[in-house]
Amino acid sequence: MRHRFLSLLFLIPFALPSFAQDSSPWRLFDVTDTTRIQFTHQLRFENLDGQFRAGRLGSSDQILLSRTTVTGEYRRDDASVVFEVLDARQALADSGSSLTSRVVNTANLQQLYATVKVNDFLQQENTLDLKLGRQTVDLGSRRVIARSTFSTAPTSFDGLHSALTLESGSRLQVFYLQPVPSSPTNLDDLLANRTVRDQRSDAIELWGMFSELPALAEGLRGDFYYIRLNEKDTRSQSGTNRRLNHYGVRLFRPAAAEQLDFEIETVLQRGSSHATAARTDMRALDHQAYFLHADAGYSFAAAWNPRLQILFDYASGDENPLDGSMERVGDVYGERRFDFGPTSLYGTFARTNLVSAGYRINATPAAGMRLMVAHREFRLAESRDTWSGTGLRDTTGRAGRSLGQQLEARLQWDVVPGNLTLEGGFAWYAPSGFARRVGGAALESQTQYVYMQSVLTF
């Protein structure tokens, strides 16, 4: 059965109508001055051999994911209403799977918001865009708040988002948001693709400001931002009672042919949080944590247009689990796939208690094709803190810090630009040090993850 599913991914291109080969993408409904309706269907098979998470049954995991989205827009003058309905389902998974609500979410109202555009706001050539309702959000590099591109059920928010764009190109965003967690979260419900209505979380609120400056200096751009996260325990949703201020700076030079490019981003977290989400945990800890990302790249004038990047990431961990402070970076709603590899069934590494260095190569073997190869080494920032997402921890620190190395590759092909994209990739992880010694770990000598997917848009 698995082979039949895989074959479907490659039979789709030949089933497309011949007119899809035109220069402009084919759509089931024509776009007009007032309306737009678009359908997208994604089919992805994933297989993981060598489970690295504690407490999972079996050493392998597999899943077939199907995601269908319908988006539409009605526009009149400078106002519009936008909706998106998402249906993400699974097959092949079993009771030992690492399924989450970020993977399966059926019959979900992903977005429903109204927009208003105000021209010449405060002065000529300024534009103010207001968005009110349920929406997905991308900010800057997408490391803090993002709509995930790999998780089949990305997080939505209810709230208000505004963006003021100046004549110079500078942009200021101000927002107030409350997340809408995907449901259900129970494994049995996820395996059965059961539909549970998503509801806004009143336990968490995000607000802040995000400024984008496109011309700090010649070729240099910058983002500066402040984000406040308030979280509290409720009967329906437990949390670590985070009250965190995020102060972020990002400086970067975009990639260009035969030029050096770079990116440096750091976020400082200050405030308070609890060590665990248990309701019996009433102790507020002084929270001081940060993460740093840095990379440098060069685009060569050669066949396949290769670009080489050197990568470094540091995300602080909790130095001492017994003191009255917390130094572990708390993830907000950012994307990690582009830094640390695929998520979904894989998701080996996250932006917390981590040190990693490596390299990445991007190339275009042919028109419409994109190839990426990356290799990274990983270590814990603090040996006594948790390896995020695995349930593994050594509070004595004797297991060391080394986690091992990862090799990743991905190939994307726009078979019919705007209508069909095929993609395949793999990640190979070889554990070492802490990952082999910590109590409770039963890691295989290596973890292998592969996926193949098709995305059809019409």
Image: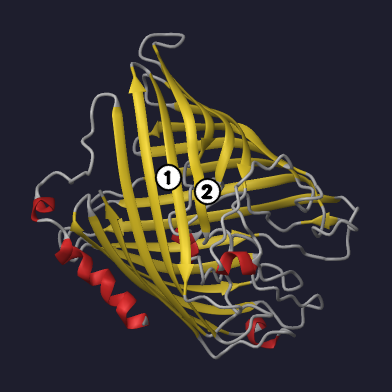
Kindly identify the residue that appears in the image at 18 percent across and 64 percent down. 13
Q: How is the image coloured?
A: secondary structure
Q: Which residue is mark 2?
A: 265
Q: Check the picture and name the quadrant holding the N terminus.
A: bottom left
User: Residue 275: x percent and y percent?
Assistant: 81, 59
Q: Quarter of the image holding residue 424?
A: bottom left
Residue in the foreground of this view, choosing between 233 and 141: 233
Q: Nearer the viewer, residue 394 or 197?
A: 197
CA distance separating discs 2 and 1 = 8 Å
User: Is residue 80 shown above or below 62?
Assistant: above
Secondary element at image label 1? strand
Establish if 439 lies above or below 20: below
Q: Position of residue 154 (x, y in %)?
A: 51, 51
For this view, does 433 lie left or right of residue 249? right
Tell me the kind of residue under disc 2.
Answer: Glu
Amino acid type at image mark 1: Phe
- Horizontal placement of 322 versus 82: left or right? right
Residue with the mark numbered 1: 252
- Left of 27 or right of it: where is 36? right
Report if the CB atoms under discs 2 and 1 are less than 8 Å apart: yes
Vertical order, 130 against 23 (above or below)? above
Residue 422, horizontal then vertical, whole percent:
27, 64
